[in-house]
Amino acid sequence: MTASSRMSPLFTDLYELKMAQAYLAEEMHAPATFSLFVRSLPPERNFLLAAGLDPLLDWLEDLRFNEEDIAFLDSLESFSQRYLDSLRDFRFEGDVWAMPEGTPFFAEEPLIEVVAPPAQAQLVETLVMNQVHSATVLASKAARIVLAAEGRAVVDFGARRIHGTDAGLKSARAYHIAGVAATSNVLAGRLYGVPLSGTMAHSYVQAHDDEMDAFRAFTREFPETILLVDTYDTLSGVRKVIALARELGEDFRVRGVRLDSGDLATLSFETRRLLDEAGLGSVEIFASGGLDDVSIRDLVRRGCPIDGFGVGTSMGVSADSPRLDMAYKLTAYAGSGRMKLSSGKRSLPGRKQVFREERGGRAVADRIARAEESRPGRPLLRRVLSGGRRLEETREGIGAARERARREIAALPESLRSLEPADPGYEVGLSPALRDHLDEVAERVRKQQI
């Protein structure tokens, strides 16, 4: 995957380009506001976790059409020469307000607001939704898994079954923001600084005639490894690790054993008993194999002596909730509020701000307000791009986003941090000024269209 393929402005829907040409033809260059939000939370989610912003901002800063892009569009015979010529000087020159990565958020709250000439704001819609939707879906799932683990380490094993290399790479970043400790994805470690974790597969054990020989050979190369013990019989594999410890004496530095199949609860208790009886209390137990938030919660509730979990497919495809009802809608143009009146698809007009009201360090309610309002609580949206350029004070590393997620999730009501649906849910309301503006714009739009 090359930088040019990631940054191509052709990663957009055809109708975005057609609308951009029409805006140009009509000389519609006044500022437009587009809001990115989720209409409703999935039944399986009490909150969502914002992710995907930082890579998106890099893309917006570098957005350019090259001659090959323009030649391809010309070959479609759909675009005017005037529009094609304009693309040679195209730059995204808008402003972007956004919730920082690692911020929990709720339905109807603007996650990102883009203010730019409509041709620019429209062109970037596809990638804005694609990048933020995918990362937020996966960060939100990972947050549930981390909560279920109750402080035990969670490691990402999922790259091989995620839908494509871009998602497989950026998922590791989203997981780490949500609290996942490490990933097996080496490129994610290089690009994003996510800690790496990995030991051995069953194939390595199978390639040897004897399981014990496999353990001996691997620990010679990687003395502090975690050994996979369930290739043939889990408890027999544990006993061979104990035998290896006796062979190596003070040179034995194996960090743990991994259980990857079978009744993980029963096997973890028996494995712990065998290790402790052998004086190997420092050897950890790591579990994997089809795990998700619900199965991890159940293992933790049963008091299983498991020190960490490896999670792959379920987290990688967010199996219980793989999509969000996310929308990117025009909410203002040329200083005038705009909105849809379609049934079940309300959009809130104008530029907005979200205020989080807190008491005693706990979030108690959110209020969606007009951008110019000053209200009680902490404003969640901040400007991150001005005139198409990133604001240096808002650049942050993945560690800052991860710490924000830890702090902000801990500040949510306890009912929201449970895997069960919260009843009642978190309170999100509109400020009186925004409600009045909503009614005013809705009435104006109705009159104009009748």
Image: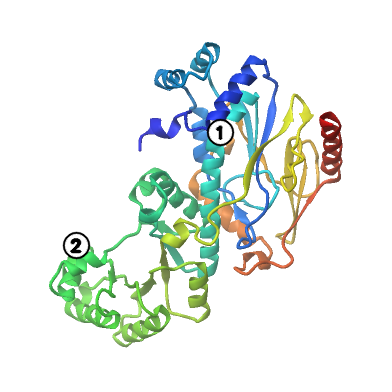
Instruction: Kindly indicate whether the residue at mark 1 contacts the one at mark 2 (C-beta within 8 angstroms).
Output: no
Q: Mark 2 Cα within 10 Å, few/some/many (few <14, many 20+)?
A: few
Q: Is residue 449 left or right of residue 93?
A: right
Residue 288 location, x and y as percent? 38, 69
Which of the pair 342/122 is nearer the observer?
A: 342
Give the quadrant of residue 426. bottom right
Q: Is residue 215 left or right of residue 40?
A: left
Q: Amino acid at mark 1?
A: Glu
Q: Work out whether 67 lies above or below 9.
A: above
* SS for callout 1: helix
| Sequence-wise first label, 2 or 1 | 2
Count numbered badges in the picture. Answer: 2
Q: Amino acid at mark 2?
A: Glu
Q: Pointer 2: what residue? A: 221
Q: Pointer 1: what residue? A: 392
Q: Mark 1 Cα within 10 Å, few/some/many (few <14, many 20+)?
A: few
Q: Work out whether 32 lies above or below 215.
A: above
* SS for callout 2: helix
Which of the pair 353/436 is nearer the observer?
A: 436
Q: Is residue 93 left or right of residue 214?
A: right
